[in-house]
Amino acid sequence: MCPPDYKNIADKTRRIKQFYKDGFSVMSDVLQQMGFVAGINIPKRCRRHFDVSNTK
C-alpha cells in the first residue's frame, strides 16, 4: 500500500508508479546480493496498480 505522502509526490498515479518501481528495485537488489536470480511475479489482485501506472 503506497503511503499518501510517499516522497512528497502529490499526483496519485505518479506516486504509486514510483512506489512500486522503488520496491521492485530494492527487492531485486536484495535477491541478487543473496545470490538469487529470480523473477518477481505480481498477483492478479495487485496488478490494478500497474494498469493505473502504465496509462501515462
Image (tube, helix red, strand yellow):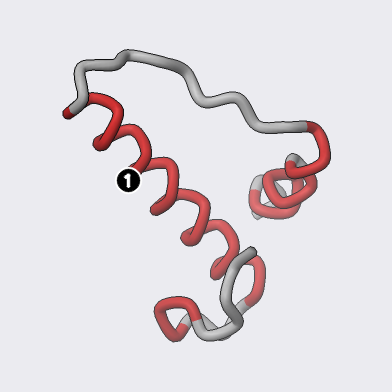
Local SS, label 1:
helix
Q: Residues within 10 Å of mark 1 (few under 14, many from 20)?
A: few
Residue at horizontal 74%, vertical 44%? 46
Residue at horizontal 47%, vertical 18%? 39
Task: Pinpoint residue 33: horizontal percent, then vertical percent.
Answer: 17, 29
Task: Pinpoint residue 45: horizontal percent, then vertical percent.
Answer: 82, 41
Task: Pinpoint residue 23: horizontal percent, then vertical percent.
Answer: 43, 50
- Which residue lies most toward the front here? 34
Eyeballing the image, is 9 above or below 20?
Answer: below
The number of numbered badges drawn on the structure is 1
Q: Kindly indicate the quadrant of the structure image that contains residue 43.
A: top right
Name the side, left or right, on which 45 lies relative to 29: right
Task: Pinpoint residue 16: horizontal percent, then vertical percent.
Answer: 59, 63
Name the side, left or right, on which 33 lies relative to 27: left
Eyeballing the image, is 9 above or below 1?
Answer: below
Residue at horizontal 65%, vertical 66%? 13
Q: Quadrant of the C terminus?
A: bottom right
Q: Amino acid at mark 1?
A: Val
Q: Quadrant of the N terminus?
A: bottom right
Q: Which residue is mark 1?
A: 26
Name the side, left or right, on which 40 lies relative to 30: right
Q: Kindly indicate the quadrant of the structure image that contains residue 11.
A: bottom right
Pick the front one: 36 or 10? 36
